[in-house]
Image: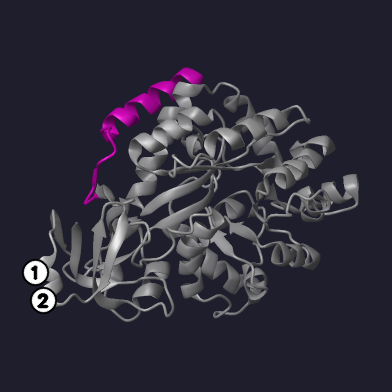
Amino acid sequence: MIRFYNGLVLTMQGEIKPEEAEVWVDGDKIAFVGVPTAQQLENAVFERQTDLGGDLIMPSLKNAHTHSAMTFLRSFADGLPLHEWLTQQIFPMEAKLDDERIYWFTKLAILEYLSSGCTAALDMYFYLDSYVSACTESGFRCIMCSADSGDANALTAIEDAYVKYNKPDRPFVKYIPGLHAEYTCSKELIEGIGALARKYRTPTSAHNSETASEVAGCIERYGMTPTQLLESVGAFDFGGVQYHCVHLSQQDIDIFKRRGITAVHCPASNLKLASGIADIKAMHNAGINVALGTDGPASNNALDMFREMYLMSVLQNIKYNDAAAFDALDVLKAATVGGAKAMYLDDCDVIAEGKQADLIVIDLHKPNMQPINNIPKNIVYSGGKSNVRLTMCAGKVLYENGEYVIGEQPEKIFANAQRLVDEMK
């Protein structure tokens, strides 16, 4: 077993308050949380003991919407609105992708995820076998959703991927069927996603109401918002997860609540592309599960969940002209528990006995975390990647004190990513 002791534990269960306790990890699961007795310590056999020295252990962060391999487009096409950015800059470059490029660009993203305390990402992209290989070789959780668009011919690939990647013997790999977005899909494909949802009793996913023009276009085409359209074809009969959700109507919010749909907020991307500020407070007050995502590194341009947490909180204050509009503790829930729920990782949400050992250690002995007044709020308002001391996924330490344990040296990943990007220009 692995023992973490002499520190604080933020379980994210019940009251969000750090407590003096130990965490023991046995295999891929959390075996003990609390203050052990002398007899428990005498009987336990530890292969590693980590003195936290007063630092904090908590559940890992979960990036609930991203396009990981878009690291190759980081700072490539900036200063453009969404539609022009996609059609004139992004899509032409994506046409040059292949398996090798996806593999190395994803590995680059995983380095950034781990160093910022993230152990799982809900990824929408292409060449899924290469993405799965990059993630599983690194020990990173691989949760995918459909990036397909076009006409109904895409349904075969979506169904095949659903069957292929959802296997009981591959717990690190999951796939959620769905659409890239309403505006990139034919009516037949949208209807087909509803049929697949009912056939497999599965949730679905999509970019949803990211911009005002997207919503206006859908209403012009179908007389409904994207949410109402997907609801009308049965795509939400078994729930789902929708990304951005910046321009939802009250009826849309009602559908999200009734169907148990998760709304994934991507504040940095929405700001950079001038898409707007999602009404997270209204969704939260309605009882909707809210999660947090970075979106891809082409529209962010970082994969830093700490930055997203800060923006999630302060943007609601601006939207409501109220400095207490959205509690930082609810932001922390969205980045951990909410993200796990969005990815259907029910055993990766909190620190509790029997749960998966997906956890991070936060270094409190940094200037930005001192003095100690309110640790959870400090994580949201002033915490950063520099505070991540250790990242563990399924009981394996993948990042610790600047060192990675993912089977590749960072410099090799950097070199391959640069070589492949240069070839594409």
Q: Quadrant of the N terminus?
A: bottom left
**Hey, which residue is sitting farthest left in the picture?**
42
Magenta span has 410? yes
Residue 23 in the image: above or below residue 110: below
Residue 262 in magenta stretch: no
Crowd rating for badge 2 (residues with CA inside 10 Å; few <14, some 14–19, many 20+): few
At 35% from the left and 34% from the top, the residue drawn is 137
Q: Secondary structure at mark 2?
A: helix
Q: Residue at x 39, y 37 (%)?
A: 136
Looking at the image, residue 363 lies above or below residue 323: above
Amino acid type, residue under disc 1 in the picture: Glu
Whether residue 5 appears in this view of the structure is yes
Q: Residue 110 location, x and y as percent? A: 39, 41
Horizontal arrangement in the rendering, residue 347 relative to residue 257 (left or right): left
Nearer the observer, 94 or 31:
31
Residue 369: x, y in percent? 29, 70
Is residue 294 visible to us here? no
Residues 73 and 281: in front is: 281
Name the amino acid type tagged 2.
Ala
Question: As drawn, is 351 to the left or to the right of 253?
Answer: left
Taking the spot 21% from the left edge, 77% from the top edge, the residue there is 35
In the picture of the structure, the residue carrying the numbered disc 2 is: 38
Question: Which residues are drawn in magenta?
Answer: 400-425
Q: Which residue is mark 1?
A: 42
Residue in front for this viewpoint, 412 or 141 = 141
Pinpoint residue 71: horizontal percent, then vertical percent.
Answer: 46, 36
Distance (Cα) linking label 2 and label 1: 6 Å
Where does residue 81 sit, x and y in percent of width and height? 67, 44
